[in-house]
Amino acid sequence: MKNLTKKYRSVDALTDVSFTVEKGDIFGIIGASGAGKSTLIRCLATLDKPTSGHILLGGADIFSMTKCDLRTCRQNIGMIFQHFNLLSSRTVWQNIAYPLEICGFSKDAINTRVEELLDLVDLKAKGDVYPACLSGGQKQRVGIARALAAHPEVLLCDEATSALDPKTTRDILALLQRLNKELDLTIVLITHEMDVVKELCNKMAVLSKGKIVESGSVIDIFRDPKHPITKEFLKHTTHELPTEIFKKASPAGILLRLSFKGNEAKEPVISQMIKRFGVDVNILYGWSELLQGILVGNLVVDITGPDAMKQASLAYLSENQVHAEVL
Amino acid sequence: MVVASCFFATLIGLPLGVLLTITSKGHIKENSPLYRLLDATVNIGRSFPFAILIVALIPFTRYIVGTSLGTTAAIVPLTIAAIPYIARLVETALRETSREIIEAARVMGSTTWQIITKVLLVEQVPALIQGLTLTLINLIGYSAMAGMVGAGGLGKVAIQYGYMRFDLFIMTTTVIIIILLVQLTQWAGNAATTHIYKKRGLLSR
């Protein structure tokens, strides 16, 4: 467990925030504007000191470090921003070289590393171009290359795709995913877009008014969101159920949202259930989505039949790891 | 005379401007008392009418240069007058650098010196050039006044030979030359700034 981040801060912006990020995780922190996301990531980036609490990176408390160690620590953390924050006075090449320059790398070392990075983010032809002539996606790729220059272990992303169009956002997310796998890069990102979390993260936390209201693995939270705020966010990424469904539901039946994960999506659980318990299952709505490369299927069904059988069906569903939410 | 005073004034004014910027609220070396002190000093410096400054500095000028008359002597009040002016211009220019960029530099582990030299000053080169241009032109104007106390240069010619001898021709000619000098300086400054903007791709078509 190389990266351990535990946070804690009082007074207005953040209260009692605590979570752990492990090496290789892509950890997403989602929240509405004003929830405290920026404050949180600024603390993680060592820019702001929490009023109380600790941030531990690899076991060492960031804010108890000496100035020298803090510099080294900062060089071990890379960061990309919503508005890219590239130096307009430097070319792409020079921007990427910046962190290496301030670390005191030799000219040759810098040359080699920058060429490597340009290749990594697919900007080989743009080395001598100034940022003002780049598109948003290209600027963010320069930002990523720059953030990774000094081989950091952690990459922080501050609403990194919020200023980009959907296609470019997907490209950047794909790049980040590739980097996470190839370099075992730990990524912590903040965003207000649930789609970003869905596509990229394996773990997440939901921030609201300075507190973490829910956290855990992305797949678990998407299947079974507990907190109202989480559900609110999910509404915007998964399907919003059409109101007609509720009209179609029979008064005596149970209206359920069933969700099937991965392999189970291929098992004929529903037809088995019908055969065994003699209930009627009316399928009103359905969709499936890809989360972290795992297929998650959803069905809205109306189950009718004798009460005892309905209860037995519910039990059968949960035995077979099909998550059922009563609507 | 003008160039020399500008040079000396920059030696002191530039660091002063940098200091003003970084000690301001929310900046990298925030220090309210120091900022307020420097701010007040610069304000006082700029409020001094130049003509009075020349006279007030006579003892100081004598101490440094040996005399209070002549071109070399004039460099002293010109420099002193230019220092707060330059400091203000530098501060205004450097403030243009967005907080976010400075924070990006901090997150990457830059030292204060690196932020000043590699980020603040470099990013604002065009604005600094424009500041320099304004200073030179300002000093050209001041140097004309310095001509009244016996400094050399166009000011002297314009005032002593032209104005005081009621020689309209000389007066007009020297004024025209001064105007041309100012135009040339402004043109050079603009050309340099435009060149840099073009290079950085910041000039819209």
Image (cartoon, helix red, strand yellow):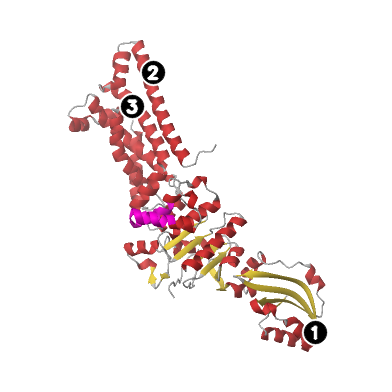
As drawn, B108 above or below A299: above
Q: What element carries label 3?
A: helix
Please report, as a chain letter, where disc 3 is located: B
Please report, as a chain letter, where disc 1 is located: A
* The N terminus of chain A, quarter of image: bottom left
Amino acid on which disc 2 is placed: Ile
Q: Name the residue under label 2.
A: B176
Q: Distance between the residues labelled 3 and 2?
A: 16 Å
- Whether labels 3 and 2 belong to a single chain: the reply is yes
Q: Where is residue A201 in the image (x, y as percent from the top left)?
A: 55, 68
Q: In this view, does A159 lie to the left or right of B6?
A: right
Is disc 2 surrounded by few (<14), some (14 to 19) or many (20+) residues within 10 Å?
Answer: few
What residue appears at the point 60 percent right and 62 percent down from the top-left corner? A193
Q: What stretch is highlighted in magenta?
A: A95-115
Q: Does the magenta stretch include residue A133?
A: no
Mark nearer the N terminus (3 vs 2): 3
Task: Judge depth for marks 3 and 2 and give the one in front.
Answer: 2
Task: Tell me where residue A309 sits by quadrant.
Answer: bottom right
